[in-house]
Image: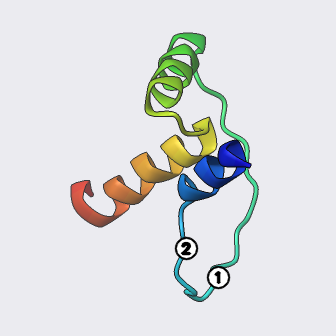
Amino acid sequence: MMDKDLASTKRQIHSAKKKESTKSITYTLFEKLVIELETESTQKGISQNVLVKQILEKYAQWDR
């Protein structure tokens, strides 16, 4: 029972924000870049998809 309680305390609570629609796309990237993205996402404990989304959102909002 304790393991279950511990696992439930690690869950994130997400706010009830409006869901944005998504679209799947494909990019061709150099293998070295893909490996770097895999390494970074693993170190951060997030998926590659989330990492790339964060990078692109930051670029679109601030760096452009």
Q: Where residue 52 sits: x, y (%)?
A: 51, 43
The numbered disc on residue 49 is none
Q: CA distance from mark 2 to mark 1?
A: 12 Å
61 shown above or below 8: below
Q: Which residue is mark 1?
A: 19
* Mark closer to the chain start, 2 or 1: 2
User: Residue 39, how many percent across, how many down?
Assistant: 50, 18
Q: Total label count?
A: 2
Which residue is most to the left? 62
What residue do we see at 33% from left, 56% from top? 58
Residue labelled with disc 2: 14
Residue 4 left/right relative to 51:
right
Q: Secondary structure at mark 1?
A: loop
Q: Nearer the viewer, residue 14 or 25?
A: 14
- Residue 26: quadrant of the picture: top right
Q: Is residue 43 above or below residue 22?
A: above
Q: Amino acid at mark 1?
A: Lys
At label 2, the amino acid type is His
Q: Position of residue 21 (x, y in %)?
A: 70, 77
Q: Is residue 15 left or right of residue 55?
A: right
Q: Secondary structure at mark 2?
A: loop
The residue most toward the front is: 1
Quadrant in which the C terminus is drawn: bottom left
Residue density around tag 1, few if under 14, some if 14–19, many if 20 or more, within 10 Å: few
